[in-house]
Image (spheres, rainbow, N blue to C red):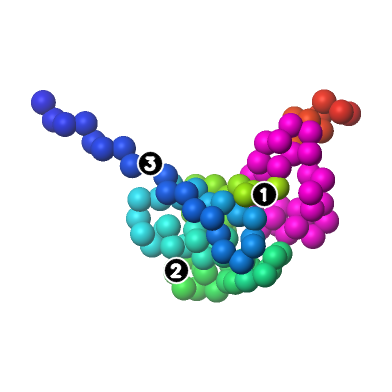
Amino acid sequence: MEPEPQKIEPEEESMPNGSDIRLKIKAQESAIAELCRKYWLVSSPPHFQYSVEELAEDYGLDVKAIHKVVGQNCTATGEFTQCAVCGVKIVYRNRTTYKQVKSYLLNEWVCRDCYDKRV
């Protein structure tokens, strides 16, 4: 009888520079984990340290592949941004979502469930 493979829990970390991003990395490969960190690394909110084009070139992938790899291997949630109604933390699906929240909504973000209940 073979021993059951050890399950590795996703790594979770706060991103620097006051970005309001808590990153949960599910990737087992260090290069993919590094890509996820670089993708979400903020130089000063809401601006990112690396462009997607730079990352694509560095990792030998096309731009669409960068989004797919990052989306499959990590989750970025707001460390401080939560729904003004129920308190659930925001999930930044991509950089555009992050930029919209940081540029326009600040602390008055409302999650989809609470928004739908209001309408």
- Res. 71 visible in picture: no
Span colored in magenta: 82-110
Q: Which residue is mark 2?
A: 59
Camera-nearest residue between 57 and 3: 3
Q: In what element is the residue under mark 1?
A: strand
Q: Quadrant of the C terminus?
A: top right
Foreground: disc 3 or disc 1: 1
The kind of residue tagged 2 is Tyr
Q: Residue 62, percent across and down?
A: 52, 65
Q: Residue furthest right?
A: 119
Q: Are marks 3 and 1 in contact (CB under 8 Å)?
A: no
How far apart marks 3 and 1 lie (CA) works out to: 23 Å
Q: Earlier in the sequence, mark 2 or mark 3?
A: 3
Q: Residue 89, percent across and down?
A: 66, 41
Q: Is residue 110 above or below residue 49?
A: above
Q: Is residue 40 left or right of residue 7?
A: right
The kind of residue tagged 1 is Phe
Q: Which residue is mark 3?
A: 9
Residue 85 is a magenta residue: yes
- Res. 50 visible in picture: yes
Q: Which residue is mark 1?
A: 80
